[in-house]
Image (tube, rainbow, N blue to C red):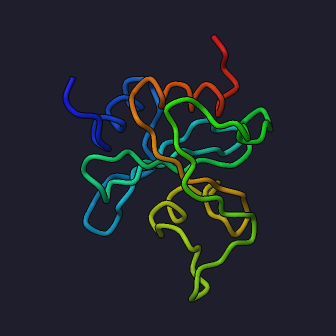
Amino acid sequence: MSQWNPEEAIRHLESLGFKPTNSHTEKSKSVGFSVDDQKQRHIAVFCGTKNTVTCYVNFNSITDEKYPIEGIEGIEKMKFYPRGHKGENGNPGISSSVARYNTSLNPSNHAVIRVHVNSENSLNKLLTWYTGNTQ
């Protein structure tokens, strides 16, 4: 396996069957994935860095569990965006491609967290919490 980076994370999410909500382009610096169609939950991988995997997820999992205070092994919580958060100019205050293509990740209406994910195994742990799938 090559060095863990956003492209590897995107390939891994696709291999697990998650469907992209958009593609990485010059204007879109993230790739979002629908994690649960019924609850409209998403995960977005930020593509603006080469050797760091930054993801955005809702602060509450699909099963309504808050992000664990003690954290998740291999994941560094970077920032919490409370519901109603706005940027300096009234924008979402996070990457516009994250908010635009993944409605559940727009802090205007949802609490969101930005995390750094150290490995594929760590991404799997994040998904286990986020989906509530303990299998």
Q: Residue furthest left?
A: 2
Image quadrant occupied by the N terminus = top left
Label count reads 0
From this view, report whether residue 93 is shown above or below residue 134.
Answer: below
Residue 99's image quarter?
Answer: bottom right
- Residue drawn 71% across the image and 57% down it: 111
Image quadrant occupied by the C terminus = top right
Q: Nearer the viewer, residue 55 or 17?
A: 55
Looking at the picture, how far across and down is residue 68, in whole percent? 72, 37
Report whether 131 appears left or right of 83. left
Q: Nearer the viewer, residue 75 or 2?
A: 75
Q: Residue furthest top?
A: 135
Report whether 97 appears left or right of 11. right
Report whether 19 appears left or right of 89. left
Q: Nearer the viewer, residue 98 or 77?
A: 77
- Residue drawn 35% across the image and 61% down it: 29
